[in-house]
Amino acid sequence: MAASAAAREIVLVDCPDDVGLIHRITGVLGAHRLNIESNHEFVDTDARHFFFRAEVTPAAGEPALPTSGVLATELARVLPQTARVRVTRAERRPIVVCATREPHCLGELLLLDAVGDLPREAHEAELARVIDGYSPEYVVLARYMRVLSEGFVARYPDRIVNIHHSFLPAFAGASPYRQAFARGVKVIGATAHIVTAELDDGPIIAQDVIHVDHTFTPERMAQAGRDVEKLVLAKAVLLVLE
């Protein structure tokens, strides 16, 4: 019987580059009678670091996938000592999406925070209480127009995904469309990234751009950019979950 869509594991490996890594990994997968439906590998030649991703299903006639823990342990055994091995089931997993309905200007929030008028600590404590009740794997900021404190970001390390309405590193921070208009750019975009303590400076997950011309006002740029923002964010969430 063919494996169902749910009976699928995603195997992720990163480690120092070495000879025969793919052979070692596929040897373990083959020993467990796993069919590799897709795989991708990449070597960062500057850092001499190896990255591998595969989607696997049970071979025809095999009853089930091995447990994630067993597979990860056996893979780690044949790889360099510092290897990171993650095996995750391709299935629906909990995330929390944060958004603000109010038309807050990020610059105004930064100003209020700088003078101490923004009750950030109380807000973040309540927000964390709600988020933790769902035990999410990721927190997604879908135009959540508040600047999060370093302490809040540290509570969810590498688990907060943000959409920023510019092609970072250009026009970070407040009002990127107005910055783009003032500079007369002909390409605007959106960037999804992992949130870190430094504003709009975390690792980039996905980006895209669209072309504009001299007839675009900042408001029209913002309107045109919304389609890019939603597509980039959707792609980024899919990437981090897989």
Image (spheres, helix red, strand yellow):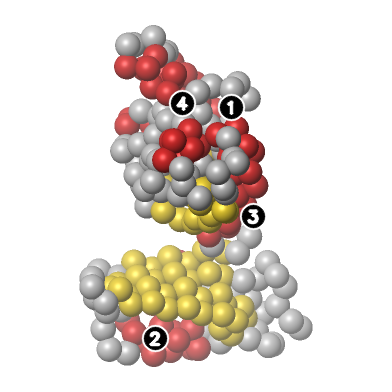
Relative vertical location of residue 157 with respect to residue 211 in this rendering, above or below: above
Label 2 SS:
helix
The residues tagged by marks 2 and 4 sit, at their Cα atoms, a distance apart of 46 Å
User: Where residue 144 sits: x, y (%)?
Assistant: 53, 32
Which of the marked residues, 3 or 1, is nearer the chain's N terminus? 3
Q: Amino acid at mark 4?
A: Leu
Which of the marked residues, 3 or 2, is nearer the chain's N terminus? 2
Foreground of the two, 66 or 178: 178
The residue that appears at 38% across and 22% down in the rendered structure is 110
User: Where residue 120 sits: x, y (%)?
Assistant: 41, 18
The residue that appears at 34% across and 44% down in the rendered structure is 201
- Residue identifier under label 4: 106
- Residue identifier under label 2: 22
- Residue identifier under label 3: 92
- Residue identifier under label 1: 100
The residue that appears at 48% across and 67% down in the rendered structure is 87
Any part of residue 49 in sight: yes
Label 4 SS:
helix
- Badge 3 crowding class, 10 Å Cα cut-off, few under 14, some 14 to 19, many 20 or more, is few
